[in-house]
Amino acid sequence: MSDTGNGAPEMTPGVRLTAEEKAAKFAELAQRIRGMQPEDAAASAARAGAARAEASMAEAPESETAVPAEQAAPPVPAPAAPAAPAARAAPAAPSAPVLRPAEPSADVLQRTVAVLSAGGAPVELAAAAVAAFGDGAAERLREDPWTILGLPGVRPEHADHFARGLLGASVGPDDPRRAQALVLWVLEQAALRGHSAQELSEVAAGLERLRMPEPAAAIEEALADGRVLPFQEELTGAEAHASAAGDGNEDEPPTRTLLALEALAMAEVSLAEKLLQLMASFVPGEDGGEQDGGEPSAESESEPESEPEGPAEAAPVSPGPAAWEAAAEAAPSSSATALIRAVAGSALVLHTGGEAARAEPAALLAAATGLGLRAWAATWTDQGKASFAALGEAGSPVVTLAELLSGTAGPGRAADGTLALDLLIVLDAPLLDVELAATVLESLADGTRLVLSGDPGQLWSAGPGRFFADLLAAKVCPAVASRTPDFGPIGELVSGVGIGELQPVEAPDKEVVILTAKDGGEAVHRAVQLLTDSIPRALGIPAEQVVLLTPGHGGPAGTRALNAAAKARLNPGPGRFGGFDPGDRVVESPAPGVVRPARVVDGDAAGLHLEYPDGSRRTVPPAEAGRLRHGWALTVHQALGRRWPAAVVVVPEDAAPALSRQWVYTAFGRGERHLSVVHAAGPALVQAVAERPAQPRTTRLRAILAENAVEAD
């Protein structure tokens, strides 16, 4: 599609408001939102959602099986970066079956191609359009051309061009259909940056950049539809002080007006409600009962015996305080003792610490199973599962989160559909976005104990929200901070970064090496030299166990440049199988935030044959090959949940906007035995560590928890 500038092409202009008129419109809109009852937004969304669902059911053929568009649609050529994904459930296990709709008929595709062609859009989008909108895709696109904005890779300027192609030059930038689509798009782009909500003023600014004549009217259109929900939040702390100083009004508490996509808003509400329900339904065990190995109570002796009618489930085990205290005293460290004691008396416990602190939830898992509880731990990656299992006894009940939720491994499900367990320990908890966290909570029965463990200094989830950080800040449950430090020069360096200091450390065995480069080209050269020669020769760590890490995919020292250089040195070849050759290191991304490293074994007409670190193999068909990238170099976000014997962190000169203390902390912690840093960013690296703790995210979970806690009191 042709790009005619930032936002709308030269459409027939509408009546433009002055800056003062726009400000008045937004003040009026914010005032109306402020006057809404708390339940109004949710009720409005529920009514609108039910109406849309009813209309969708009426249009859909009975034989069609609905699945998310990102699962159903094969990759298609896209003119730009992909749009935000739909609401995401748990990362599916690789072997989990995926239900797909029947192949669209030739007639449906032909009609969709005709509409796309008439509007000047790439006909390759037809398959994605039918997958997203069903058999009525052609009619839907013709009636509302801006619907195309929901397809992968389509940006507002592309949608505007398509609308002009279908509707003619008379179409204006203030068309209600365009207004609604752009509000959704602005919020979806914010979700890609991790925000589960956006302030009203920020959404308005985004619409103005897209040349929306009346942003306030556009937002009202979206609110009326119910796919965007408004919220009013009272500010606290420094934000409240700054707001009061700015407007000079000290009579009313300062507030902010937020807008959120319906799915994300409902996920945060559901998550908060389930967290509070889990804590409210918890009943700790008592000493002296039959479950603790004591004598049966008088009540149980007085009950008449009766023959069971059939097999019954075993009564749940509920150890009392004495049993828990004995387990706590037997723990291997004071931090493990504190964690076990916290879990004894609480349904929800947070645990924070670095890599070495994982020994504490491992001790909890062993203690809980020893007390007879159905206890399981869940990690983010296969490697995390293996390393955590190694901390306990053989056969420790640990699975990946994907395996747990898909049912391919773990405790299985009870009759009511909840997970059949008494205690769940979730490692890598900061990687849970709000939708995935809500899925985990909905899988737990009332009375289940939940322990969320992770390193609060690391990067947050790939999806929207900051679940673990918000829960820590809300202080609604016990939090146990580990006193077990990460040892060695790497641990010392990372700990310093965590408190905002980037200081040199003593590394007598070359555990940490810092190199500078004048530009990205030199950084690539030095990084590949470390990967292929210096680290294997000096430290005995083979290149297969070394990873290159960088902030992004593009640029002079992004993953593309690093992977091309690494392939040229380690596995040169023509890329005869879709750009890959046997022996190439690759990574597969089956879902946002989920990365699986593998090695190419071979390739043929059936696809690429991959071998994974655990020895399993899979063939990736040609239609899914677009999800593969070379894997010698990764972004730090792709490396989350994994560590390597050696890591080379590359910080190019153009990396300054992406750098934060979180990013540096996470990147430097990926190396187990050795860390090399090659940076050409000058003072930007030190400044990021000292002055920029994290890239900010706007969320609502903490406020919702606070509101519910007040109501409960």
Image: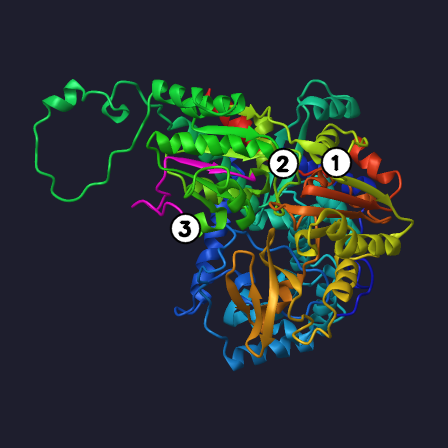
- Choose between 688 and 698: the one closer to the eye: 688
Q: Quick one: which residue is furthest to the right in this view? A: 518
Rendered-image quadrant of the N terminus: bottom right
Label 2 sits on what residue type? Arg
613 relative to 236, above or below: below
Residue 95, position in %: x, y? 46, 60
Residue 556, position in %: x, y? 84, 57
- Choose between 57 and 661: the one closer to the eye: 661
Q: Earlier in the sequence, mark 2 or mark 3?
A: 2
The residue under the point 46% across, 67% down is 100
Is 682 on the left-hand or right-hand side of 622? right
Label 3 sits on what residue type? Ala
Alpha-carbon span between mark 1 and mark 2: 39 Å
Q: Regarding mark 2 in the picture, which secondary structure is present there?
A: helix
Between tags 1 and 2, which lies in front? Answer: 1
Residue wearing tag 2: 32
Residue 359, position in %: x, y? 53, 32
Alpha-carbon span between mark 2 and mark 3: 50 Å
- Choose between 517 and 557: the one closer to the eye: 517
- Sort mark 3 into few (<14), some (14-19) or many (20+) by Cα contacts within 10 Å: some
Coloration of the structure image: rainbow
Residue wearing tag 1: 661
- Choose between 410 and 527: the one closer to the eye: 527
Alpha-carbon span between mark 1 and mark 3: 36 Å
* Res. 141 image quadrant: bottom right
The residue under the point 72% across, 18% down is 250
Residue wearing tag 3: 409
| Magenta residue span | 408-428
Label 1 sits on what residue type? Arg
Q: Earlier in the sequence, mark 1 or mark 3?
A: 3
Magenta stretch: includes residue 647: no
Q: Earlier in the sequence, mark 1 or mark 2?
A: 2
